[in-house]
Amino acid sequence: MSTQAPRRGPRHLTVLAGVVLAVGLHASPAPAQTKAKADEERIVRHDSSPYVPTPQRVVDEMLRMGRVGAKDFVIDLGSGDGRIVITAAQKLGARGFGVDLDPELVRYANAAAKQAGVTERAQFFQRDIFQTELAQADVVTMYLLPEVNMLARPKLLAELRPGTRVVTHDYHFEDWLPDDRITLDVPEKKVGTPGLAYIYVWIVPGQGAGRWQGRMPVGGQMLPVDFELEQRFQILTGKANVGGRFATIVFGEMVGNEMRLVLTVEVNGRSMRHELRAPIRGDEGSGTVAVGADTVVQREPLTITRTARRAAYFGDSSRSR
């Protein structure tokens, strides 16, 4: 991938972003034939912005952390020579495509897919990422420079359905905190932080902000509950009332369309942990409450209804999703 900004000139921002995306960002399929290897080396040198292969270990880990499986559709933004989508198709049975502005890299990636026998499940197109429709993706992968990540962030949040996984290599989305991350020792990596690779995962959140009311079991009774929730990306905060008594929201988040809340509620003079998990459909949530301290001692059904909506904050705009 390109670890330095391309030479800057009086260009439109989209063109600048496109130049960054045009460099190949993923590892070469390392074909055995001498001619194919020569072609690979020519591609590496052809652009003034450096093209740096990504180690296969990083590619495999990105797909693992993105939980890519045979039923998934993977879109790789800035696909370079195509290794991520080809690996997903060849090793995991997934389908998908990659986009890149560089026609040579696109041709190379399609040739590599043919050589791997996965052309029906892995295709590559010469296309601007900002002109690429993302709605069909189950997983989006990216190895782009930080400024391009931030340019792409509003598009990801606007177009991807809740539950879609976004996996990046080395660079993140600033105040949209990842749901998971790891650091890999990669001795052969010479760019960015030499010897280390950072992989980040986000799960696109649904909209959980607003007022929710329902009933849940507390101390052997079914009591009315009332949550006033605010949302910043996937994180939920706010106030809770259970049976007319204040309860503390210890932690809250939206994992895709599933609301997860951890409450402490006073029961018979002591604080009791209640963990709520409720998949949301529109303004209705139906799930379970796990009640216990160190271990779960009771699991009961939960139904809640959103009686008032509130806009969630998704970085570049506040909106209801």
Image (tube, helix red, strand yellow):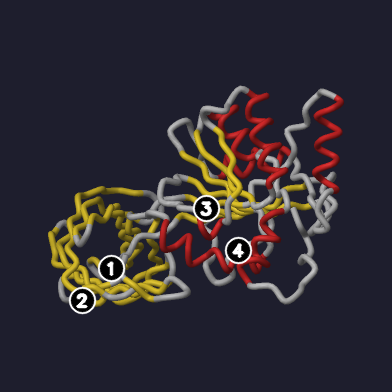
Packing grade of label 1 (10 A; few <14, some 14-19, many >=20) is many
Instruction: Name which of mark 2 and mark 4 comes first in the sequence.
Output: 4
Amino acid beneath label 3: Val
CA gap, disc 1 and disc 4: 41 Å
Q: Nearer the viewer, mark 2 or mark 4?
A: 4
Residue on which the image places disc 4: 149
Residue on which the image places disc 1: 265
Q: Which mark is residue 293?
A: none
Instruction: Name which of mark 1 and mark 4 comes first in the sequence.
Output: 4
Residue on which the image places disc 2: 245
Residue on which the image places disc 3: 166
- Label 4 near label 2: C-beta < 8 Å? no
State the image quarter where residue 224 is shown: bottom left
Packing grade of label 4 (10 A; few <14, some 14-19, many >=20) is some
Question: In front: 109, or 227?
Answer: 109
Amino acid beneath label 1: Val
- Label 3 near label 2: C-beta < 8 Å? no
Packing grade of label 3 (10 A; few <14, some 14-19, many >=20) is many
The answer to whether 248 appears left or right of 10 in the picture is left
Task: Write the residue at 35% across / 72% down.
Answer: 312
CA gap, disc 2 and disc 4: 44 Å
- Label 3 near label 4: C-beta < 8 Å? no
Q: Is residue 199 visible?
A: no
Instruction: Name which of mark 1 and mark 3 comes first in the sequence.
Output: 3
Task: Write the residue at 70% across / 60% down.
Answer: 20
Instruction: Name which of mark 2 and mark 3 comes first in the sequence.
Output: 3
CA gap, disc 2 and disc 3: 39 Å
Question: In front: 261, or 168?
Answer: 168
Q: Nearer the viewer, mark 4 or mark 3?
A: 4
In this rendering, the answer to whether 95 lies above or below 252 is: above
In this rendering, the answer to whether 22 lies above or below 82 is: below
